[in-house]
Amino acid sequence: MELVAYSDGGARGNPGVAGSGWVLYSDMRGNAEGRVILDCGTWYCGDNVTNNVAEYQGAINAVRCAKAFLDRQPTTASPYVRLPNLLLHLLRICCITNLFCLQVRGYV
């Protein structure tokens, strides 16, 4: 199973009133027909917040939701399943801003 998170954020005025949102899917078959929505949410970031901060907050909340989802899953007999980097292998974050994606991947 792969987890897919879509997130975005924005500010009116930049800086200004800002918010973000995310949706977390399980991608069982690798296509839209196999997707199941696991969680979604919105976040009010504040009155004097930049667009970049709002976008990061959306991604941070998506990762938190993915971690919480994995923490609720039953454990298996294998000691390798609960490695700290398990989330990195199972989660794919999709976002609008290319710069943000590059920064998360460590290219910038």
Image (cartoon, grey):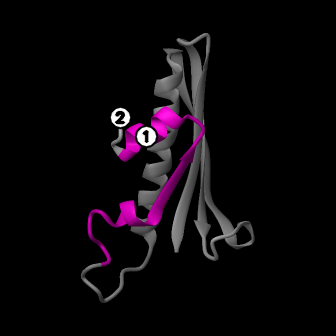
Q: CA distance from mark 2 to mark 1?
A: 6 Å
Instruction: Give the side of residue 18 with respect to residue 79, left or right.
Output: right
Tell whether 39 sits left or right of 33: left
The residue nearer to you, when weighing 101 against 82, is 101
Frontmost residue, 31 versus 23: 31
Q: Residues within 10 Å of mark 1 (few under 14, many from 20)?
A: few
Q: Residue at x 59, y 67 (%)?
A: 26
Circle number at residue 102? 1
Rendered view: 50 above or below 106: above
Residue 78 covered by magenta stretch: no
Under tag 1, what secondary structure? helix
Please give the residue where the numbered disc 2 appears in the rendered image. Answer: 108
Does the segment drawn in magenta span residue 86? yes
- Label 2 environment density (alpha carbons within 10 Å; few <14, some 14–19, many ≥20): few
Q: Residue at x 32, y 77 (%)?
A: 81
Quadrant of the frame with the C terminus: top left
Q: How many numbered marks does the figure carry?
A: 2
Q: Which residues are magenta?
A: 81-105
User: Is the residue 50 above or below the residue 102 in the image?
Assistant: above
Query: Which secondary structure, mark 2?
Result: loop
